[in-house]
């Protein structure tokens, strides 16, 4: 978008942060509800693994200790200036949301809130 610094794909329902869940959580919810076909489950898990290997994980995410995961209820946005590296994989996750009827929005903005984490590819805000 025109001069927008940040982008987020978010479902049209809220999660524990009180804000719309992002594309990873929305796909995770489909998987946990056992709605994915075996092929789509595999595709999602491979895509998530790729992101885990290629996108820094903000330090407040703690999958090993869910009770300590994201205590500030932050949400993340991609930086548009470096998003090209992730576009193909983002489209896979969006495609799964489409296929399983999860409504979502692609949000471009410069107004994000208080930044509590930043790396070359993303920010996390509260």
Image (spheres, rainbow, N blue to C red):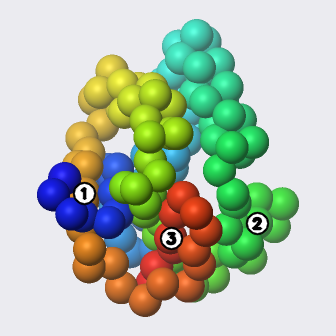
Which image quarter: residue 108? Answer: bottom left
Disc 2 to disc 3, C-alpha distance? 17 Å
Residue sitting at the far bottom: 114
Instruction: Work out whether 52 lies above or below 59.
Output: above
Q: Earlier in the sequence, mark 2 or mark 1?
A: 2
Residue sitting at the far left: 2
Q: Earlier in the sequence, mark 2 or mark 3?
A: 2
Mark 2: which secondary structure?
Answer: loop
Where does the C terminus fall, quadrant-wise?
A: bottom left
Mark 1: which secondary structure?
Answer: strand
**Which residue is depicted at the point 43% across and 60% down?**
79
Find residue 73 and report its horizontal and vertical position in percent: 52, 78
> Could you tell whether 66 is left or right of 93 in the image?
right
Front label number (2 vs 3): 3
> Could you tell whether 7 is left or right of 68 in the image?
left
Q: Which residue is mark 3?
A: 123
> Could you tell whether 101 is left or right of 28 in the image?
left
Find residue 30 and report its horizontal and vertical position in percent: 48, 35
Q: Which residue is mark 2?
A: 62
Q: Which residue is mark 1?
A: 107
**Which residue is depicted at the point 39% across and 30% down?**
91
Q: Earlier in the sequence, mark 3 or mark 1?
A: 1
Q: Residues within 10 Å of mark 1 (few under 14, many from 20)?
A: few
- Is the residue under label 3 in contact with that under label 2 (CB below 8 Å)? no
> Could you tell whether 39 is left or right of 17 in the image?
right
């Amino acid at each position: 978008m025109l001069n927008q610094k940040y982008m987020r794909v978010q479902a049209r329902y809220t999660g524990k942060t009180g804000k719309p869940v992002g594309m990873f959580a929305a796909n995770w919810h489909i998987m946990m509800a056992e709605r994915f076909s075996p092929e789509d489950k595999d595709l999602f898990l491979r895509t998530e693994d790729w992101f885990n290997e290629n996108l820094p994980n903000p330090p407040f995410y703690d999958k090993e200790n869910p009770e300590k995961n994201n205590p500030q209820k932050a949400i993340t946005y991609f930086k548009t200036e470096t998003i090209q590296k992730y576009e193909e994989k983002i489209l896979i996750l969006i495609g799964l949301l489409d296929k399983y009827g999860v409504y979502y929005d692609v949000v471009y903005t410069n107004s994000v809130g208080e930044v509590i984490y930043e790396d070359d590819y993303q920010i996390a805000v509260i």
